[in-house]
Amino acid sequence: MGKASELKEAALHLGFDAIGITAAHVPPGASYLKEWLSLSYQGEMSWMARRPEIRSDPQQYDSLAKTIIVAGVTSHQTSAPSRRGRIAAYAQGLDYHEILREKLERLAQSTLVPWGGQFRVCVDSSPLMEKPLAAMAGLGWQGKNTLLIHAQHGPWLMLGSLLTNLEISPDSPSHDHCGTCTRCLDACPTQAFPKPYVLDARRCLAYLTIEHPGSIPEEFRPLIGDRLFGCDECLDVCPWNRHAQQSRELQLSPIPRADLPEMLAWDDTRFRKEFRNTPIFRLKRSRWLRNICIVLGNIGTELDLPSLEQASRDKDPLVREHALWGIQQIRDRLKTERARI
Ligand code: B12
Ligand code: SF4
Ligand code: SF4
């Protein structure tokens, strides 16, 4: 069996849902990164703007890299948790970074190392453009929502890579199958796509609820709806979901959560204890409570007012500000409802 086939068999054995191989070249479209940054679409993710020439060229990141093995695990969840407040599918269980990192490490130890190769594991946070590399490795194509669309798993693959100094025969790149579809562009609650295939992160609810550090601009707060963490709108509507199956990765299965008013009363120690090893942990208590206040402002009732009032006296000014907004939203709603009776 050739190296490529051996790698693929080992990857499927480890629970990866997709794997592809590409030479460590600059992916087509990488030059758009500079254009994207020049328009400030990265918002406050200043790490995205650091050394773009490295991010767009894997060999500038690791001069020994000859091959990139890109692998994915689907995060698709077919049932919705019963509690109020939605969390993006990829973040409902344990942290995918650790899950993928461990699998990639095991894949490398069982294949690349016995072949005499060196390797580097990259999951999300390394300066690489994972979607264009995955497309180059034949996993799928970058859709109009900018995500990597896999013919079977749709937009749900979470990606990770192995960079190696070995030469392994590459797969052929995939072609775009979006056709005339515009469902993701039409479904976006904030119109975050200035044009197909381009995302202005500053308008994206995933950015606003996860990456944005401070106060959330008021224009976006009602549009957040009941989203506590991330947004799956432009994934849910993709027709390439039709064959997508529930993730078989048990570590990504949804963890039961407390109700919103209960979490609003948690101190830092409790927050850390409850969310350790999950993607929510890196939000820290401040942003998590900020998000809960917005969601309660959008969907809460009179019964949620006491917990918001307590939060409006929190030691954290970000929490206080958003709690006051939430209270006002609920009161306005109650007033309108009473006027109607
Ligand atoms: C920064 C970032 C974000 C930002 C910006 C997203 C973005 N689209 O750039 C924010 C915080 C908004 C975000 C949100 C999400 N993210 Co994110 N994110 C990243 C990260 C770290 C870098 C992405 C990047 O390089 N962006 C820069 C832009 C320029 O790159 P690009 O989107 O590939 O750009 C291409 C096109 O836009 C096009 N293009 C750009 N300009 C132009 C101009 C013209 C004229 C044309 C024609 C084309 C064009 O060409 C570019 C190259 O192909 C990657 C991990 C990684 N290291 O790659 C994860 C990653 C992309 N995220 C991921 C996920 C899951 C999400 C969310 C689904 C999470 C959620 N449910 O809330 C959302 C989805 C939102 C969306 N529709 O993209 C996954 C995607 C997996 C997949 N199947 O595609 C990744 C790969 C993480 C991982 N390891 O799995 N993310
Ligand atoms: S994740 Fe949500 S807000 Fe962001 S681009 Fe997709 S639909 Fe729009
Ligand atoms: S919803 Fe349609 S346009 Fe958007 S990524 Fe899926 S197939 Fe492409």
Image (cartoon, rainbow, N blue to C red):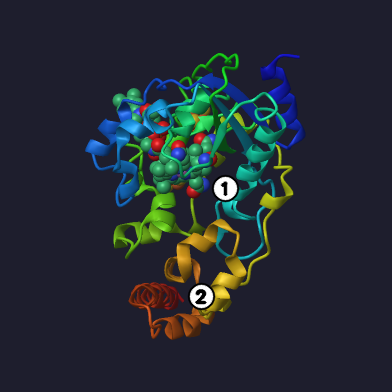
**Where 328 falls versus 191 (above or below)?**
below
CB of mark 1 near ligand 1 (< 8 Å): yes
Any part of residue 139 in sight: yes
Q: Residue at x 61, y 49 (%)?
A: 98
Badge 2 local density, few (<14 within 10 Å), some, or many (20+)? some
Q: Residue at x 29, y 35 (%)?
A: 36
Looking at the picture, how far across and down is residue 203, in whole percent?
34, 48
Res 37 → quadrant: top left
Q: Earlier in the sequence, mark 2 or mark 1?
A: 1
Q: Amino acid at mark 1?
A: His
Identify the secondary structure beneath mark 2: loop
Q: Which residue is labeled 2 in the image?
A: 301
- Work out how far the residue at label 2 is from the one at label 1, CA to CA, in angstroms: 36 Å
Any part of residue 187 in sight: no
Q: Residue at x 63, y 38 (%)?
A: 104
Looking at the picture, how far across and down is residue 140, in whole percent?
55, 24
CB of mark 2 near ligand 2 (< 8 Å): no
Identify the secondary structure beneath mark 1: helix
**Where 206 falls versus 217 (above or below)?**
above
Badge 1 local density, few (<14 within 10 Å), some, or many (20+)? some
Q: In front: mark 2 or mark 1?
A: 1
